[in-house]
Image: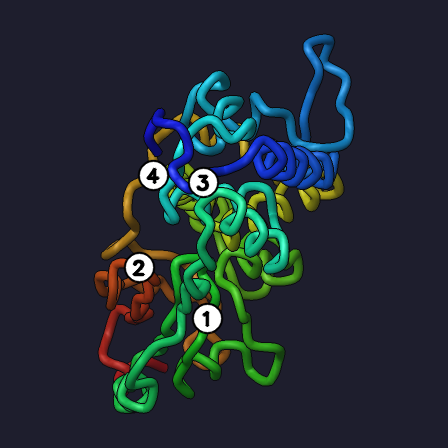
């Protein structure tokens, strides 16, 4: 974003509409979400403050204020970050782009993969449990060896939601849950949020975490502990899992690099300590 006046010939009326749109979207952010605003006296009120919005966008409060008043020119990438932070609808995003640039917005980014059959074939060709997930830990493709781990129960659709929110899994599947699973993945979420605070899927995950933590006494302590150390990529680390056929087993997590930088898709393989045909 530059500090030059908006270059689309915005009229005072358009600047006023732009400011009103952003202020309305900020005010609509749920009060108890991670972005819920707080007054200087510590009371919470509905909406997202300019201070909090500026922090989430990685800019000064003054710069954000100038942007909201229509005094600065913004690039499309920055406008999409604003749309995510303010949780704009498609209609609100469209209006913001028109008022800010005088042009239609680009099509929303798609996380859809090309060559899905090839990726599925790669998974199906392996005897190792494996899955393909995106940057928000949504599981998009799996193989039979992975589905077998849950022995007829519902297969997880999001890695972090399953690890952090599924209480039944803590005793039945994810052994040594606190230090082996929850703590490292909380650090992983914190690192992802720091790198991409405007990513809508990550914002939603963090909002859910804050909400669930109010009802789950195990999570607040772990969330506090997760601040002590930086996240280290778990590639090659072992985790204790209860496999329906192998019993308690220390599997090694092996991950590929993202298949493309934008979507962050990656393969994850769960490798047992011995070849599969030698496991119990």
Residue in view at x 40 percent, y 38 percent: 74
Q: Which of marks 3 and 4 is nearer the N terminus?
A: 3
Q: Is residue 131 above or below residue 255?
A: below
Q: Which of marks 4 and 2 is nearer the N terminus?
A: 4
Q: Name the residue beneath numbered marker 2.
A: 262
| Inter-mark Cα distance, 4 to 2 | 21 Å
User: How would you rate the neighbour count of disc 1 (Cα within 10 Å): few for under 14, some for 14-19, many for 20 or more?
Assistant: some
**Lateral position of residue 189 relative to residue 232, left or right:** right
Number of callouts in the render? 4
Nearest the viewer among 187 and 63 is 63
| Inter-mark Cα distance, 4 to 1 | 21 Å
Mark 2 vs 3: CB contact within 8 A: no
Q: Name the residue beneath numbered marker 4.
A: 231
Tag on residue 197?
3
Residue in view at x 77 percent, y 31 percent: 46
Mark 1 or mark 3, which is nearer to you? 3
Mark 1 vs 2: CB contact within 8 A: no
**Lateral position of residue 44 relative to residue 105, left or right:** right
Q: Can residue 183 be seen in this view?
A: no
Query: Where does the C terminus fall, quadrant-wise?
Result: bottom left
Q: Is mark 3 on a helix, strand or loop?
A: loop
Q: Is mark 2 on a helix, strand or loop?
A: loop
Q: Name the residue beneath numbered marker 1.
A: 139
Q: Is mark 1 on a helix, strand or loop?
A: strand
């Amino acid at each position: 974003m530059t500090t030059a006046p908006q270059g689309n010939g915005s009229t005072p009326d358009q600047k006023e509409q732009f400011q009103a749109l952003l202020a309305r979207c900020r005010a609509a952010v749920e009060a108890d979400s991670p972005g819920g605003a707080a007054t200087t006296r510590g009371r919470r009120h509905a909406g997202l403050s300019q201070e909090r919005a500026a922090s989430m966008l990685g800019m000064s409060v003054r710069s954000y204020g100038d942007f909201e008043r229509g005094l600065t020119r913004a690039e499309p990438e920055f406008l999409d970050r604003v749309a995510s932070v303010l949780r704009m609808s498609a209609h609100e995003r469209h209006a913001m782009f028109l008022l800010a640039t005088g042009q239609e917005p680009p099509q929303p980014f798609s996380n859809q993969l090309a060559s899905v059959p090839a990726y599925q074939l790669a998974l199906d060709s392996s005897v190792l449990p494996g899955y393909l997930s995106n940057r928000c830990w949504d599981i998009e493709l799996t193989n039979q060896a992975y589905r077998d781990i849950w022995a007829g129960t519902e297969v997880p659709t999001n890695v972090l939601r399953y690890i952090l929110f599924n209480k039944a899994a803590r005793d039945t599947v994810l052994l040594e849950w606190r230090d082996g699973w929850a703590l490292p993945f909380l650090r992983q979420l914190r690192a992802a949020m720091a790198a991409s605070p405007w990513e809508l899927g990550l914002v939603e995950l963090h909002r859910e975490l804050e909400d669930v933590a109010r009802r789950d006494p195990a999570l607040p302590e772990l969330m506090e502990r997760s601040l002590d150390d930086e996240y280290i990529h778990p590639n090659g680390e072992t985790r204790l899992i209860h496999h329906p056929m192998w019993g308690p087993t220390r599997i090694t997590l092996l991950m590929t690099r993202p298949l493309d930088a934008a979507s962050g898709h990656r393969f994850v393989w769960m490798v047992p300590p011995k070849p599969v045909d030698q496991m119990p």
